[in-house]
Image (spheres, helix red, strand yellow):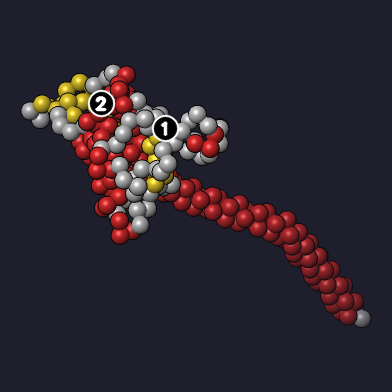
Amino acid sequence: MIGLETRRRTKEAELATQRRDASVVVTRYQTALKAWDEYQPKQEALEKARKAEQEAESAREKASHGMEKGFIAHHERLEKLGQDFRRVTRQILRPPYDGKLNVSKDGEVRPVWHRVKNGDEGPEEVSAALDSLKATVFDLTVLLSSIEGKADGPGFLMHDSPREADLMLPIYHRIFKELARWTEAVRSDNAPFQYIISTTTAPPDELRGQEWVNIPVLDASKPEGRLLGVDI
């Protein structure tokens, strides 16, 4: 009997130890499960944050690439516009005058004229008359760039009574002749531009026909005689 009692107590002790061990395991499991439940949302939030950061970085790279492409395209357009300004300057003013576009740090575009002698560029030519003509030539340059598809202009230009005294008659006539030449050059394309100049100075003889001159002649003394038929 003593032996059975001893074995019983030994077994009970073992069971008690196992229960304690099992309780410890359960507690650890519950602790681990709770920790996982707390960790999982944080991990998901961290993954979301990492994904958002990657998307933001990708957007920054794309924006930077787009800005770089835009800057290059803008620079190329200005370069082409400068080439056109030089071409139109030479066509209307003729050598030794030459032209270029200066671009400031703020992006302001300023047309400049100078004389060229023996291949050397002289100082900038500045006067009230030249400034008036320069503005006209720059307008024509933008129109030409639009015609040739280098700019996004509307292909429409109107000059209201530029002063012939500022332009000088030979140069004044060259403007008409140059625009007529542009028209003939794109005649097959139905001249994808319109240029209107209202003036009291007659155009060159060869450009006084109905194809070039508005009939009847405008009359500013009455509204219906004006270009748009009304007083503005």
In this view of the protein, can residue 98 be seen by the observer?
A: no
Q: Where, by quadrant of the figure, is residue 10 drawn?
A: bottom right
Q: Residue at x 41, y 43 (%)?
A: 215
Instruction: Please rate how many residues cluster around mark 2, counting C-alpha atoms within 10 Å: few if below 14, some from 14 to 19, many from 20.
Output: few
Q: Residue at x 20, y 21 (%)?
A: 123
Provide residue 107's location: percent of width, then percent of height: 39, 32
Reply above or below: 210 against 98: below
Provide residue 78's location: percent of width, then percent of height: 33, 40
Mark positioned earlier in the residue sequence (2 or 1)? 1
Residue 33 falls left or right of residue 104: right
Residue 217 falls left or right of residue 114: right
Q: Tell which of 164 and 34 is nearer to you.
A: 164
What label does residue 215 carry, if any? Answer: none
Provide residue 210's location: percent of width, then percent of height: 35, 47
Amino acid found under the numbered disc labelled 2: Met
Q: Tell which of 89 and 57 is nearer to you.
A: 89
Q: Residue at x 30, y 50 (%)?
A: 183
Per the image, the residue denoted by label 2 is 168
Amino acid found under the numbered disc labelled 1: Asp
Q: Tell which of 133 and 228 is nearer to you.
A: 228
Residue 63 falls left or right of residue 68: right
Reply above or below: 211 against 229: below
Furthest residue to the left? 118
Provide residue 9's location: percent of width, then percent of height: 87, 72
Q: Tell which of 126 and 44 is nearer to you.
A: 126
Per the image, the residue denoted by label 1 is 160
Q: Residue at x 29, y 54 (%)?
A: 186
